[in-house]
Image (tube, helix red, strand yellow):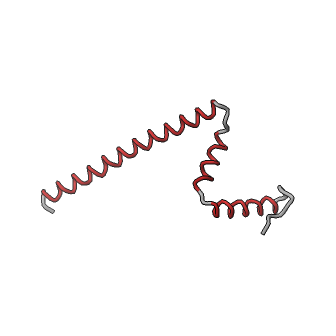
């Protein structure tokens, strides 16, 4: 490869690295913001573990949630943790 081609590849590599570094910093800032919001919620008396579960549930579609609930109920019933078997 010629020196010019090496220079172009080096510049492209540097640009990728700098973009990734910038995005990683933004990701850290956003993660810190989310942590602050959870802290605010906790200070207002909300259970942050439950809030995180609610957020995870809202990311799933209704069908996926229903399937998971049915499987969970099946497992809990099999372990004797709930009395009624899941409805088919």
Count of marks placed on residues: 0
**Which residue is at the far right?**
83
Residue 49 vertical position relative to residue 3 in the rendered view, above or below? above
Residue 47: image quadrant is top right
Residue 35: image quadrant is top right
**Which residue is at the far bottom?**
88
Specify whether 30 is left or right of 74. Answer: left
Specify whether 5 is left or right of 47. Answer: left
Q: Which quarter of the image is occupied by the N terminus? A: bottom left
Q: Which residue is pictured at 55% across the width and 36% down the height?
A: 37
Residue 14: x, y in percent?
26, 49
Residue 43 vertical position relative to residue 61 in the rendered view, above or below? above
Which of the two residues, 82 or 17, is positioned nearer the viewer here?
82
Q: Which residue is pictured at 83% across the width and 55% down the height?
A: 81
Q: Which residue is pictured at 49% across the width and 37% down the height?
A: 33
Which of the two residues, 25 or 48, is positioned nearer the viewer here?
48
Residue 17 vertical position relative to residue 40 in the rendered view, above or below? below
**Which residue is at the far top?**
43
Residue 88: x, y in percent?
78, 69
Residue 78: x, y in percent?
81, 63
Residue 75: x, y in percent?
77, 61
Specify whether 83 is left or right of 6. Answer: right
Q: Which residue is pictured at 64% across the width and 39% down the height?
A: 48
């Amino acid at each position: 490869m010629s020196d010019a081609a090496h220079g172009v590849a080096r510049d492209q590599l540097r640009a990728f690295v700098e973009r990734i570094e910038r995005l990683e910093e933004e990701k850290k800032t956003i993660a810190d913001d989310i942590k602050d919001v959870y802290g605010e919620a906790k200070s207002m008396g909300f259970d942050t573990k439950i809030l995180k579960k609610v957020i995870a549930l809202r990311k799933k579609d209704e069908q996926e949630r229903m399937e998971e609930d049915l499987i969970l109920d099946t497992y809990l019933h099999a372990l004797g943790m709930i009395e009624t078997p899941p409805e088919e």
